[in-house]
């Protein structure tokens, strides 16, 4: 069953000679447990697709369903509750709160959703440990490198009972080893039933996905099933 469905979604900015068609007639469905990578040149509409999928922006036309609910029929409060409880975001600029430590940033969405602080802290530490950041948990964002801030934002996006993960270039500031650790965390979320959409320029990262969608000038121009992912190639062969 599709957890995210976009039907004939278009987004236009400006009017007249300044009009820009960021998305045109996008149809995309992402099942629970599936990882979809979105690729395309700069300006092709990838980031706009993510913000509309996560209800941070509204389409000019078309419908977006998340968990079977039509976003345009939901109140602002209901959309905010959906984002807080069900959707994890990884932004290119990280969006970490400067006054909170790494673990506090990760735990914050859980606490906002009513989870006791101690339990939220434990879950936040576990997510940071998976990404090799346990020793940086008490540091503030301005005390972390760009790559470390990126990993904290990813830990925040996957912690808890999220159902949809939207990631914009999640490995952009990372070396290959940390990029692989990030993808393992994303795949682990998918195995728990999370639907994930990852925007990337990296063909190697895209190869981890179940499906790759290519955008050009705001339109889907191709979809493909990638070859076996590095994850599957690293799994031990069965005993004979």
Image (tube, grey):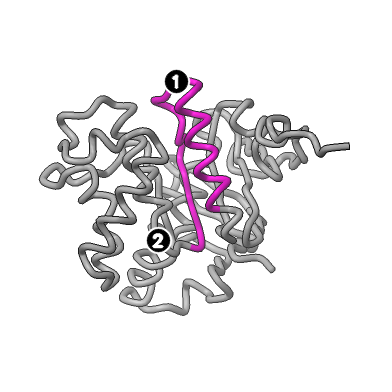
Q: Residue at x 23, y 69 (%)?
A: 116
Looking at the image, residue 55 sits to the left or right of residue 70; the answer is left
Q: Residue at x 62, y 26 (%)?
A: 204
- Kindly give the residue lying farthest to the front in the view shown: 240
Instruction: Count neighbours of disc 1 (C-alpha within 10 A) and say few if under 14, some if 14 to 19, many if 20 or more.
Output: few
Which residue position holds label 1? 175
How far apart marks 2 and 1 lie (CA) works out to: 26 Å
The stretch drawn in magenta includes residue 174: yes
Of pointers 2 and 1, the one earlier in the residue sequence: 2
Residue 138 is situated, as x and y percent measured from the top left of the image, at 17, 40
Looking at the image, residue 120 sits to the left or right of residue 219; the answer is left
The quadrant in which residue 178 appears is: top left
The stretch drawn in magenta includes residue 128: no
Q: Is residue 37 above or below residue 115?
A: above
- The residue range painted magenta reads 163-189
Which residue position holds label 2? 160
Q: Residue at x 28, y 63 (%)?
A: 119
């Amino acid at each position: 069953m599709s957890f995210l469905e976009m039907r004939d979604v278009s987004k236009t900015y400006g009017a007249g000679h300044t009009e820009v068609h960021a998305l045109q007639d996008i149809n995309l469905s992402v099942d629970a447990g599936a990882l979809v990578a979105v690729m395309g040149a700069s300006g092709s509409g990838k980031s706009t697709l993510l913000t509309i999928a996560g209800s941070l922006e509204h389409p000019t036309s078309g419908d977006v369903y998340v968990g079977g609910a039509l976003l345009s029929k939901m109140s602002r409060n209901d959309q905010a509750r959906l984002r807080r409880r069900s959707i994890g975001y990884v932004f290119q600029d990280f969006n970490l709160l400067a006054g909170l430590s790494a673990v506090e940033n990760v735990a914050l969405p859980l606490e906002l959703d009513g989870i006791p602080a101690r339990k939220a802290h434990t879950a936040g530490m576990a997510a940071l440990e998976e990404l090799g950041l346990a020793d940086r948990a008490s540091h503030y964002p301005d005390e972390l490198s760009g790559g470390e801030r990126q990993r904290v934002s990813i830990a925040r996006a996957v912690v808890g009972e999220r159902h949809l993960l939207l990631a914009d270039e999640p490995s952009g500031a990372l070396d290959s080893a940390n990029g692989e650790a990030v993808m393992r965390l994303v795949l682990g979320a998918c195995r728990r039933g999370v639907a994930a959409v990852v925007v990337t320029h990296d063909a190697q990262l895209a190869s981890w996905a179940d499906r790759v969608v290519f955008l050009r000038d705001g339109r889907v121009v191709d979809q493909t099933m990638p070859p076996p992912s590095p994850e599957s190639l690293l799994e031990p062969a069965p005993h004979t």
